[in-house]
Image (cartoon, grey):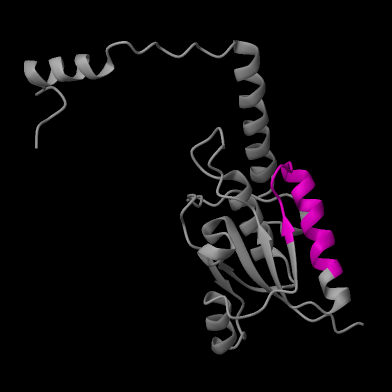
Amino acid sequence: MSKKNDITDEEKALFREAIKGTVPLKAKDDKHTSAKSNTISTAYRQRQAVTDNPKSGHLNLSSTPLAAEDIVRFARQGLQHKQLKKLQKGQLKWQASLDLHGMSLSQAESALKHFISGCQQRGYRHVIIIHGKGSRSAIDKPLMKNFATQFLETHPAILALSSALPKDGGTGALYAIIKRDRSI
């Protein structure tokens, strides 16, 4: 295996030949880049603002954020193993779905709260939440996937989560089991 500095003259010539006729991309204007950077850092600050208080309405990024292809598995203590296996295999027919594409984090938070509440009121237990893989994200990690996963893991009505099967969105979606609302 050659080191970075061990490029032969022949390899250099091959590279020059391969890129002949290409034109460098134009740099983005500073105004556009700054606006996008500020949006991302604001989102991170919002999630990092409160570290141990899930009731505050803000979430913090975990020390190792999820990547686009990372598989999510989460279950509260007491959930039957058989139910969890069915969830992971996509064998529980979902009764409702929520698509978070195109939403800001605050919109997604509100949508998730209303969705979970509505599902409990209707008696829906098995749902799918589509967050996307973050392939168009300006950062190297999918922000919405991380946000949705952490939000759902800390929500008291969520009993279990699992990345969906490829036919349902794969690692860009989550199957969830919602706790029954006993007050209804």
Image quarter in which the C terminus is found: bottom right
Quick one: 16 or 57, which is closer to the camera?
Answer: 16
Counting from the top left corner in percent of width and height, residue 109 is at 76, 52
Give the residue drawn at x 71%, y 42%.
Answer: 102
Q: Main secondary structure of the magenta part?
A: helix
Above-or-below relation of 33 to 69: above
Above-or-below relation of 60 to 179: above
Q: Quadrant of residue 163?
A: bottom right
Q: Is residue 57 visible?
A: no
Which range of residues does the magenta coloring cover?
98-118
Counting from the top left corner in percent of width and height, residue 172 is at 57, 55
- Asked if the magenta segment contains residue 115, the reply would be yes
Name, please, the residue furthest toward the right: 184
Image quarter in which the N terminus is found: top left
Give the residue drawn at x 79%, y 81%.
Answer: 180
Quick one: 38 or 100, which is closer to the camera?
Answer: 100
Left or right relative to 180: residue 131: left
Q: Quadrant of residue 36?
A: top right
Counting from the top left corner in percent of width and height, residue 183 is at 90, 82
Above-or-below relation of 3 to 144: above
Quick one: 65 or 103, which is closer to the camera?
Answer: 103
Left or right relative to 10: residue 30: right
Give the residue drawn at x 56%, y 14%.
Answer: 28
Above-or-below relation of 43 to 153: above
Q: Is residue 48 visible?
A: yes
